[in-house]
Amino acid sequence: MPRARRTDRVAAWPACVATLGFLATASGKATTYVSPSVARSAVAPPRPAAPVPPQMSRTDERIACPVPEEGIAHAVELMREGAMFRYTFPDGGESPVTTAERALADYTGHKYCVALNSGATALYLSIRAAGVEPGSKVLCNAFTFGAVPSAIVHAGCEVVYVESKEDYTIDVDDLKAVIKEQPDCKALMLSHMRGRVGEMDAIAEICKEAGVVLLEDCAHSLGVLYNGKHTGHHGVACGVSAQSFKMLNSGEGGFLLTDDPEIAIRAAIYAGAYEKNAAKHGTKNLPAEEPHHAKLAVELPNLSVRMSALHAAVLIPQMSTLDERIAEYEVRYDNLAEKIRSSPAANAALY
């Protein structure tokens, strides 16, 4: 299996607890009533100082990547103008969401991109847009994050798990066995958990022979290449996350990427491109308008799961630093892997 670039950071956000002060009388008795008119004329006592949130050390690896100043300034400008809705912009090309979509598609090499409110939504919409019907069986590697099978359930489908190997990737032999046992499986939602990429050529061939739609969860594999090509191209569509502990951080957010024009337009309409708003995505992010698109806009439900311009604004400057940050994380990984290998008790699949 080709060596993949590693990008994911295993992280768990620490709970931040602020202690709030409460004012009370020393005796604990109720205070004397004062009418509102008298209260207004009286000099108000000084308000207690607002609690100061704990300062988080930048050496703590549990902390998400900070937003570049450029993204913060852009977001503030949008708030001042009230231009936070992606379709506020008459020319769709001016929308920060359109800019973010194009930047990510250029990075991964996909033709089309639809920005959404989460990575899980991207997985859910990829199932819907690919035509997998509710009630269908959808395969999923057993070693994954809960949001992945949850997206399958959200689409009204049944999850069928496939075993994973010691290197954390899907077991190709078990995939064959499960499909043979349950030939009515309609799709495989393949999760590249922790940035580990399986035998993609073999997996794609198995799916093709069985008539199984291959979809990819690339939440952990943004920046990971397989035989020189970005992950997400073996399947008909893939989902990328912009949740705080991913390579892109907008708190919450996600993208659906595909080379299939029909999946792209259906995903955009599902996401909330109501009436003629799909045209505001631009021909670089969605296929050129066709007569049947207007029909889809009234036939498909508007799920209103779009990405806001605020989220896109903080993501745009992060796109240009992806490779730089990936290189930094690879050094961290190598240093950690070396320490683990030096332990005689360690038993881990390390690249």
Image (spheres, grey):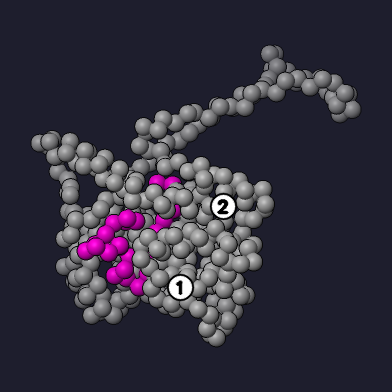
Q: Which mark is residue 149?
A: none
| Place of residue 59 in the rendered image (x, y in percent of width and height, measured from the top left) | 36, 32
Q: Residue at 24% across / 59% down in the picture?
A: 197
When the figure is inspected, residue 106 is found, relative to residue 135, above or below; the finding is: above
The span picked out in magenta is: 221-246
Q: Residue at 45% across / 41% down in the picture?
A: 66
Please, what secondary structure does the residue beneath circle 1 have? Answer: helix
Q: Mark 2 vs mark 1: which is more N-terminal? A: 1
**Residue 141 figure quarter:** bottom left
Most distant residue in the bottom direction: 291
Q: Is residue 316 visible?
A: yes
When the figure is inspected, residue 41 is found, relative to residue 147, above or below; the finding is: above
Q: Amino acid at mark 2?
A: Leu
Q: Would you name the residue on which mark 2 appears? A: 310
- Callout 2: few (<14), some (14-19), or many (20+) C-alpha neighbours within 10 Å? many
Please, what secondary structure does the residue beneath circle 2 have? Answer: helix
Q: Would you name the residue on which mark 1 appears? A: 264
> Label 2, label 1: how many angstroms apart (C-alpha)?
23 Å
Q: In the displayed structure, does residue 7 sit left or right of residue 43?
A: left
- Callout 1: few (<14), some (14-19), or many (20+) C-alpha neighbours within 10 Å? many
| Place of residue 234 in the rendered image (x, y in percent of width and height, measured from the top left) | 29, 70
Q: Is residue 158 visible?
A: no
The foreground one among 310 and 210 is 310
Q: Residue at 23% across / 55% down in the picture?
A: 4
The foreground one among 325 and 128 is 325
Q: Amino acid at mark 1?
A: Ala
